[in-house]
Amino acid sequence: MTRLLDTFNVLEENELISNQIDPCIREGLKFYPRPYQVCAINRFEYFLKDYKKRPFPSHLFFHMATGSGKTMVMAANIIQLYQEGFRNFVFVTHLTNIIKKRKQIFSIIPQKIQNIFFLHPLIFMEKKCV
């Protein structure tokens, strides 16, 4: 069985997965993602919208090193999913410090969001999201 990683490597090599970040995502993030984060964001976008073998429901995880910016990738993924109509997001971890940090970053209080990853206000289709 071919791994999704191997499949997506081939798709990227054949330029079927973009190497440019979607302007809607870029405009929603406070910081510009690093090249490998852009790769992860674009692979998720392809999986979400174009991957024909996508199982339903889908379960994914990002295997990235500590300090590599998974939270930035998740912020971009939330924008991508929000564009597709999703409104509820769940984070799973076994470390309490990660839970505390995520609560701080993804709190429903706009001031907390504004100061971490999202530009404030986050606007999608001419409507304020946060």
Image: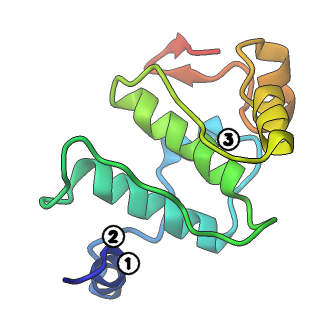
Residue at x 44% of width, y 28% of height: 82
Q: Nearer the viewer, residue 118 or 69?
A: 69
**What is the spatial separation of the Cα atoms under label 3 and label 2, in whole angstroms?**
21 Å
Apparent side of residue 49 relative to residue 97 in the rendered image (left or right): left
**What is the spatial separation of the Cα atoms under label 3 and label 1, in whole angstroms?**
25 Å
**Could you classify mark 2 by the number of other residues whose Cα lies within 10 Å: few (under 14), some (14-19), or many (20 or more)?**
many
Labels 3 and 2: the sequence-earlier one: 2
Labels 2 and 1: the sequence-earlier one: 1
- Residue designated by label 2: 17
Labels 3 and 1: the sequence-earlier one: 1
List x then y, in percent, for residue 27.
61, 39
Picture colour scheme? rainbow
Q: Name the disc covering residue 5, or none.
A: 1
For numbered disc 2, what is the local secondary structure? loop
Residue at x 66% of width, y 45% of height: 93
- Residue designated by label 3: 29
List x then y, in percent, for residue 22.
47, 51
Residue at x 51% of width, y 28% of height: 89
Amino acid at the residue labelled 2: Ile
**What is the spatial separation of the Cα atoms under label 2 and label 1, in whole angstroms?**
13 Å
Residue that protrudes farthest toward the left in the picture: 52
- 13 w.r.t. 103: above or below: below
Amino acid at the residue labelled 3: Leu
Nearest-to-viewer mark from 2 and 1: 1
